[in-house]
Amino acid sequence: MKKRVIVIGAGGAGLTAAAAAAKDGADVVLLAKTGPGNASCTAYSGGFFSLASGSVSPEDHLKQVFETGREVSDGDLLRTLAFECEGALRTLCSWGVAMKINNFGRAAVRVSSPSEIMGGAGMTSELTRIAKAEGVSILSDCAATRLLIGDKGVEGVEWVEWRTGKARSCAASAVILATGGGGRIYTRTDNPARMTGDGYALALESGLGLVDMEYVQFYPLGWKTPGYPVWMVGLGILDYIPVTDGTGREFLKETILSWGFSSGKEANYFGRDKTAIFLSRHEKNGGKTLLHVEKLSEEMLSNPDVRSSIMLDIPAHRRTAPVESSPVQHYFSGGIPIDGEGRTDLPGLYACGEVTGGVDGASRMGGNALTNIVTFGLRAGRAAAAEASLCEDEMKQINMPPLYFPVHDGGMPPAEARDRLRAICSKGLGPCRNAGELRSCIEEIGKWKSGTGPLAVKTSLDLLHVLEMKGLAVTARAVATGALAREESRGVHFREDFPEELLRWKKRIRISCGGDTLSASFEDIHS
């Protein structure tokens, strides 16, 4: 018998946690909704880290993150991140992950990336290899549906193998949620297709709360012209080519310089929130944002800073005229509250990565996402391995669990139902919000749930889409509930009807579930 740990999610956080737990002697089962690694936000990230290293002290890093997050980060988590992040990254290096750490508070894993747009895919491939070498059992195409909970806490996990339609369960006294965020509630998102808020739903239905769900980060620049992927463009591009409004004025560069940023590159680390809100308001008022890619010379395209900003290979025939840009959803700063070892309030349940909340506060500093997943993935994996109990039970087949929507051959295609929800969220839960639109959004989500009716499952992918509906719906409702409750503007959350940041709102909002209702409450932040 071994101490069994089940990890749900196979992106950077889940793979790090799984490998760490296995290295510490646990019998680890990793549930991947598709295959491990490459369907994750880590794989599609820029591949950059911000951290305390060299001339950037832990105190410096802590201050940068705290101020960027508008002073509402969880102090305990922030101290853990700032003081432990360099050691965590060097641990991955010792495992065999190819990474360059400089002396100026930056690191990168792009050296092993297979393409410009997948800056973290080399790291996830390496972590997959490491996890397998440590004996981690990776189960692909498995969608977790329920946490099994007993008198003493977590007792295991149920899931569905969506390609076969078989449902299974496995006992474990330690489970790690590493399911990522919920970006797929939006039509315009750079998140991969499987980022559907599964972990938020699993946590809420297990009696846990979620914090900071109103803080959804949008990347200020994102390709919008037909023929280009819905993908982010780094603000560093402002340092190389004009970004203009419809009149030809370089309005964005003028604006970020007036805010005190010295360059687009600096704004990309510390000013994404203000810039995304500014551009969203500009667009709401009928304005355009144009990226002058026709100014990109071959010499510019050989510059690593330019390539990491555009993250695409743009052939010459596509660089003959400006292309349109619009903010694109990028990251969730809210989620499950944890302690410095990844423990949640439910005994035996741990969490790490984007599914958690508290580190970033109201706005995430650029480069902090990968630092977060490695630091807390490592710590959660080690803590779970140390605290898990011996387990005899093996996997067993069970009956298919109840689905969020009933299934009928003549029903609506699941993809259509999903797209209707995304349209609702994109309209009401963007960077700029107000009470009327938020209340309407909550009402429309309710109508969507009651009016969708049965869904038709004709393929295995249809079944996966149905299995993802609960996460999408819960995520949408949690964001809307938190955003309506926060009657101020802070970080990435901008209220048109409450445009000021207010001292009395320096607290966090907890979303709880009672039956089919979500509610918001207020609590002090760990300082």
Image (cartoon, helix red, strand yellow):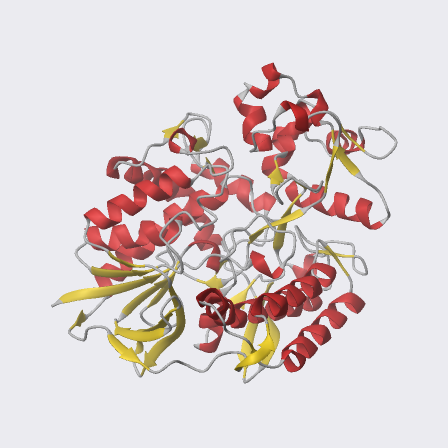
Instruction: Residue at 41%, 26% (x, y): give it.
Output: 102
Q: Residue furthest top?
A: 299
Q: Is residue 439 above or below residue 376?
A: below
Instruction: Residue at 31%, 44% (x, y): give it.
Output: 127
The one of 39 and 320 positioned closer to us in this rendering: 320
Q: Residue furthest left?
A: 1
Q: Is residue 250 above or below residue 153?
A: above
Is 524 left or right of 287, judged from the image as shown? Answer: left
Q: How many marks?
A: 0
Instruction: Residue at 47%, 59% (x, y): give it.
Output: 355
Is 168 left or right of 102, judged from the image as shown? Answer: left
Task: Locate the N terminus by quadrant.
Answer: bottom left
**Rendering coords of residue 431 (x, y %):** 71, 53
The one of 40 and 47 positioned closer to us in this rendering: 40
The one of 174 and 312 positioned closer to us in this rendering: 312
Instruction: Residue at 38%, 58% (x, y): give it.
Output: 9
**Rendering coords of residue 427 (x, y %):** 74, 61
**Rendering coords of residue 24 (x, y %):** 19, 53
Tell me if residue 263 can be seen: no
Tell me if residue 503 can be seen: yes
Is 470 left or right of 160, judged from the image as shown? Answer: right
